[in-house]
Image (cartoon, rainbow, N blue to C red):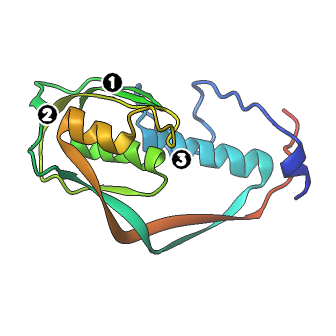
Amino acid sequence: MDWADSIRYDIEARGSFGLDPNIVMSANPNRAQILRVLQTLLADRFKLRVRHDRREGDTYNLVVSSRGSKLERAPESTSATVRIGLYTGRRTTAQLADYLGSIAGRPVADGTGLTGIFEMRLQFTEILDDPAGVSVFAALREQLGLQLEPARGPVDTYEIVDAQPPTDN
């Protein structure tokens, strides 16, 4: 699969989700639905086959800090502004934990025990090892009253078994 290391592709998908008749999309698809459609697209166009394994590994638990939560309840959920260095919106702590997993480089489980929707604004330095910036770990404690504790738990791993150059449109 040397071609996969040297050739780059832009994948542009539009609102037609008829790739897999088993996937019924709502008007506002959730992340899981979109990922299933993307997986089907990659399998179809690139003949991508992956091996999934789940094993014990390093994780984090999102917990309330010893100083207590600074989260304020919100009446309803909103979409979030999500990018590296910024997370805002009215969300659950489970949704925050999912986001933090992509930032921290390992799965994050919601262990806060907090239920409901909260107003969230988390801002931190995008470069994780910037000594002049605010790390995501410090920002969680200072801004939200939460923290990440190292833990062990299930970690999903994926290995590419095979892939072919894409078929023509």
Label 1: state its secondary structure.
loop
How many C-alpha atoms fall within 10 Å of the one at disc 1: few (<14), some, or many (≥20)? few
Mark 3 residue element: helix
Q: Is residue 41 left or right of residue 133?
A: right
Question: Which label was assigned to residue 71?
Answer: 2
The one of 148 and 134 positioned closer to us in this rendering: 134
Residue type pointed to by label 3: Arg
Q: What residue type is labelled 2?
A: Leu
Residue closer to the observer: 17 or 64: 64
Residue found 12% across the figure and 45% down from its top: 115
> Gap between marks 1 and 3, in whole Å?
21 Å
Q: Estimate the spatial distance between the alpha carbons at disc 2 and disc 1, rounded to whole Å.
A: 17 Å
In this picture, residue 92 sits left or right of residue 100: left
| Quadrant assignment for the N terminus | bottom right
* 128 relative position to 90: left or right: right
What residue appears at the point 16 percent right and 32 percent down from the top-left corner?
Answer: 118
In the rendering, which numbered label is found on residue 36?
3
- For residue 34, above or below residue 46: above
Q: Which mark is residue 42?
A: none
Say which label, 2 or 3, has the lower sequence index: 3
2 and 3 marks in contact (CB < 8 Å): no
Quarter of the image for residue 150 reads bottom left
**Amino acid type, residue under disc 1 in the picture:** Ser
Is 145 located above or below residue 105 in the figure? above
In terms of sequence position, does the residue under pointer 1 or pointer 3 come before the other?
Answer: 3
Which residue matches tag 1?
79
User: Is 146 rendered above or below residue 80?
Assistant: below
**In this view of the protein, can residue 92 be seen by the observer?**
no
| Quarter occupied by residue 132 | top left
Q: Which of marks 2 and 1 is in front?
A: 2
